[in-house]
Amino acid sequence: MDVVVLIGRVLFALIAVGSAFGGHFMATDSTAGYAESRGVKNPRAMVLVSGVLLAAAAVSLMVGIYADLGALLFGSFTLLTAFTIHHFWTDEDEMTKQMEMTNFMKNLSITGGALLAFALFATAGDDIGLTVTGSLFDLGF
């Protein structure tokens, strides 16, 4: 079962890796332009800070260094981004509204997965194998 959890952690974190490196670091200007168009203040700094947060969450999940914290970081990012960037209910253009609604729902789904991962790691603690550290949080019952 340890290998299945490891594969799940890695696959789950891949979207954070792609977003951090593909968008936030390698395409900072275009990502910041998009963030600015969605109302984000100081978009370049926010893109870089959130890129670091995503990269840290991805490493945490993939390597298993306080994976519960990594799941919380990832879930926090996707929840905040859903409401601050993908606020489809403010859009008038139907194509933009549909694209933003899809991204909003994707982010909420990732947040749900991150909460499930957090609960798994924080409850199982050291019983989950193939990690560098155990959990930072202890929700064991």
Image (cartoon, helix red, strand yellow):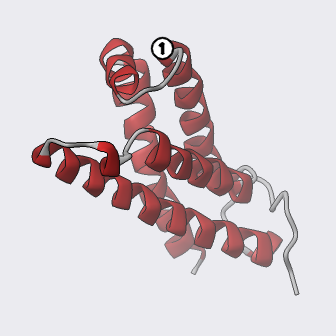
Check the picture and name the quadrant holding the C terminus: bottom right
Residue displayed at 40% across by 48% down: 15
Relative to 138, 12 lies left or right: left
Q: Nearer the viewer, residue 38 or 90?
A: 90
Would you place residue 16 above or below residue 1 in this image?
above
Would you place residue 4 above or below residue 61 in this image?
below
Residue displayed at 61% across by 34% down: 53
Residue displayed at 66% across by 63% down: 130
Q: Position of residue 80 (x, y in %)?
A: 55, 46
Q: Bin the neighbour count of mark 1 within 10 Å (Cα to Cα): few under 14, some 14-19, many 20 and up.
A: some
Q: Nearer the viewer, residue 133 or 72?
A: 72
Counting labels gives 1
Check the picture and name the quadrant holding the N terminus: bottom right
Q: Which structural element holds mark 1?
A: helix
User: Type of residue at label 1?
Assistant: Arg
Using the rendered image of the protein, determine whether residue 129 is visible from the camera's viewpoint. no
Relative to 119, 76 lies left or right: left
Q: Position of residue 4 (x, y in %)?
A: 50, 74
Residue 20 found in image quarter: top left
Relative to 99, 109 lies left or right: right
Q: Nearer the viewer, residue 118 or 126?
A: 118
Relative to 96, 113 lies left or right: right
Q: Position of residue 5 (x, y in %)?
A: 55, 71
Report the residue marked by disc 1.
44
Residue displayed at 55% across by 30% down: 50
Using the rendered image of the protein, determine whether residue 34 is visible from the camera's viewpoint. yes
Q: Position of residue 72 (x, y in %)?
A: 67, 55
